[in-house]
Image (cartoon, coloured by chain):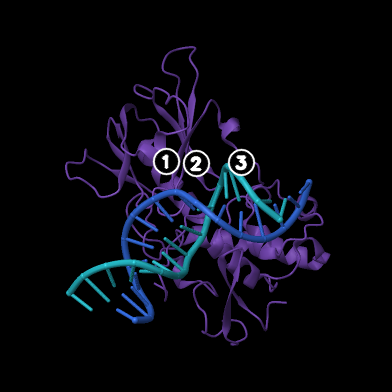
Chain colours: A purple, B blue, C cyan
Amino acid sequence: MGRGGGREPLPELPEVETVARQLAPCIVGRRVERLVVLDRLLRDGRGRWPQVTGRAIVEVRRSGKRVLIGFSARRAGGAPLWLAVHLRMTGRLLWVERRERQVREHLRARMRLDCGELLFIDPRRFGTFDWHPSAEAAEPAGVDPLSPALTPARLDELLGASAQSLKAWLLRQDRLVGLGNIYASEILHAARLSPFRGAGALTPPERGRLAVATRRILLRAIANCGTTFSDFQDARGREGAYQHLLAVYDREGEPCPRCRARIARTVQQQRSTFYCARCQR
DNA sequence: ATTATATCCTGATCGC
DNA sequence: TGCGATCAGGATATAA
């Protein structure tokens, strides 16, 4: 864990992908016996909660930074239902094989299935549940960086003539979806691009480097089950391993793994950015 | 229209 | 030892 106040893991694309992949085989095909929401913040301002009791879970996958859970119709001819869970800062979806007897701290919701229980634990209470009538309705506005839809032409279109810094641009969920503060820094380092560069002013080769680095970093993070600093745990309650592979994030003052210069930290959009001023131009 | 800032929330840490 | 201030950040609302 890093220096300074309460550095935490952020469930970004690789962490959410990890949770969804591990959760799917545990709960797909299972029937919901009961959903209990314990935190008022999860319920307020979103209208009536749909009835999920009796539905079967038909699909679990990542959608942007959300875990998307598909439920069958409650009766023949009825409408299906989709739940998009956003973990935000500290949310966790934890699968337990048996019904829990012990009281867990920060437990915000529990969904009892016929074979176990899915717990939503979220100390900081930023996480959200959103209900949708279809998977399409739950799709985010931005393009998934791992989707084949992200062609060089599409990336050009997304970057456009944006005057924002590259770091700020990468965090925008209405362009690319799924990147957060950790992977934005890591991707820019891998692409050898300064976080201060204007997003709309990259040369074609630089855009190519950005595209390649984005894909490479995310796939490698997924292969390592994401990054854990202190809070993030996957659906089985285990930690990821990518924190050992971070090149710049939370490594201020340490040598750049590429050129050995000291890694710098700056603040952009009220968020920390870590970068190497020598090899990121 | 785009871009920047304040806000939500809690736990860990820091300084006195 | 205690206690208040500070910091972390995803997304949204609001401001510029």
Q: Chain of mark 2?
A: A
**Image point (39%, 43%), residue name:** A23
The reply to whether callout 1 and callout 2 are in contact (CB within 8 Å) is: yes
The quadrant in which residue A56 appears is top left
Which residue bears the numbered disc 3?
Answer: A140
The quadrant in which residue A168 appears is bottom right
Q: Chain of mark 3?
A: A
Q: Under tag 2, what secondary structure?
A: strand
Q: Under tag 1, what secondary structure?
A: helix
The spot of residue A170 in percent (x, y) is 65, 59
Q: Chain of mark 1?
A: A
Compared with A265, A134 (above or below) is above
Q: CA distance from mark 1 to mark 2?
A: 7 Å
The tag earlier along the polypeptide, 1 or 2, is 1
The reply to whether callout 1 and callout 3 are in contact (CB within 8 Å) is: no
The spot of residue A5 in percent (x, y) is 41, 70
**Image point (27%, 34%), residue name:** A115
- Is residue A256 at least partly visible in the picture? no
- Is residue A24 at least partly visible in the picture? yes
Amino acid carrying label 2: it is: Arg
Quadrant in the picture for the C terminus of chain A: bottom right
Which residue bears the numbered disc 1?
Answer: A24
Give residue A37's mark: none
Compared with A256, A16 (above or below) is above
Quick check: do tags 1 and 2 share a chain?
Answer: yes
Which residue bears the numbered disc 2?
Answer: A61
Q: Is residue A156 left or right of residue A280?
A: right
Of circles 2 and 3, the one toward us is 3
